[in-house]
Image (tube, grey):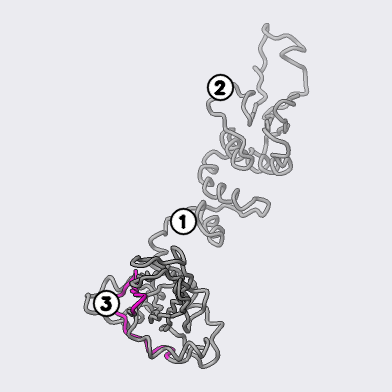
Amino acid sequence: MTSQILHLQLTAMQLSDAMQPSAVGKGVSDFRQTALSIQDSVRAGCDVLIHPQEPSEIVLQLENIGSRNLRLNVRIEGNFPSEWCRIGMEGYDLAPRSRMDAVLYFQVPADFFENQAPLEPGQSLVLDYHSLIYVYYTEEDTGRQLVETAGVNLYVRPRSLYLNFVPALYREVDFIGRFLKIFEQAFEPAVQTLDVLWAYLDPMTAPQAMLPFLAHWVAWPIDRRWTLERQRFLIRSAVELYRWRGTRRGLRLYIHLYTDLPLDDHIIAEKDKHICIEEIRGQGLVLGNTRLGEDAMLGGGRPYHFIVRLRCDRPNQVDEQLVRHIIDQEKPAFCTYELYVEELGVRS
């Protein structure tokens, strides 16, 4: 690829052990017919391997071996979609006895092998593509316009992990890689699932479709009033909630999981906590140590009664009806309660 003025050199940045042309889809491409006419002329050109979604590059080195400045323009034509390739250049002027690199960036869509929509009935998927790089240049003083060409063969191949488990001799055969990819696509999803099985069994990371199974596993009823995020927290904490059910600690934990109000375990005084649960207690009948109307009363007592006060940091943080449902569900059946929802700074 040398003339008296401009020298071209192509270097592929990604090479494969095997670059035999594929028989799949050979000569059946539905791209421009003008590009197909160059197929035979570029079979001996630069070869580049492309994996879907992974970028591949070709470095085109341009050397001006003449005595005049050259004005350059590079383009590529072939039987592949134009959006697969873009060209990056350091500039458009090349001084005498100097060099410049242009880079051709190739990237095939990730769904190349899965997307069969463009194929017509009876048509095969094309894996081998052929193209020509045209370098147009104009001499500065004479105005003479010339062109140099270079051939490029593009081979689209699936990346197969299974090639790492066969001897190097078989990795040199292009068909082996494509053949092993069939088994990899069948078995690899199951292998990947086993590798991250722990994530499927954790309610915080499991797919949404797995949540009903995990909830049934811990006998937790799915309530559509809970958001998806709350369902995950509650299923994960179900065993602990069962352990403390009917106690102040269990009720506080349940309300915390729903409202995000802090547990305030570091605060000793119950009345200062965001989730305050106070039990109404008396000393019973004590003779000689009671002042009627101050710390004792006749009749009207409410045994097994408690008061819940929620101190919210922002308005509408708590759905009162849902909190009442939680308390009714968690408290002992014989207990009664009062519920007060307050906003910080507006305590009554």
Residue matched to label 1: 201
Magenta range: 4-26
Q: Quadrant of the N terminus?
A: bottom left
The residue lying at 47 percent from left, 79 percent from top is 145
Q: How many marks?
A: 3
Q: Earlier in the sequence, mark 2 or mark 3?
A: 3
Q: From the viewer's perspective, is 5 left or right of 338?
A: left
Q: Are discs 1 and 2 less than 8 Å apart at CB?
A: no
Judged by depth in the image, the label closer to the viewer, 3 or 1, is 3
Three-letter amino acid code at the position of disc 2:
Ile
Q: CA distance from mark 2 to mark 3?
A: 69 Å
- Within-10-Å neighbours for mark 3: few <14, some 14–19, many 20+: some
Circle 1 residues within 10 Å: few <14, some 14–19, many ≥20 = some
Residue at 72 percent across and 25 percent down: it is 345
Residue 171 disc label: 3
Tell which circle, 3 or 1, labels the residue nearer the N-terminal end: 3
Q: CA distance from mark 1 to mark 2?
A: 37 Å
**x then y, percent, for residue 99:** 35, 66
Amino acid type indicated by mark 1? Leu
Please determine whether, in this image, residue 218 is positioned above or below residue 3.
above
Quadrant hosting residue 196: bottom left
The vertical placement of 109 against 223, above or below, is below
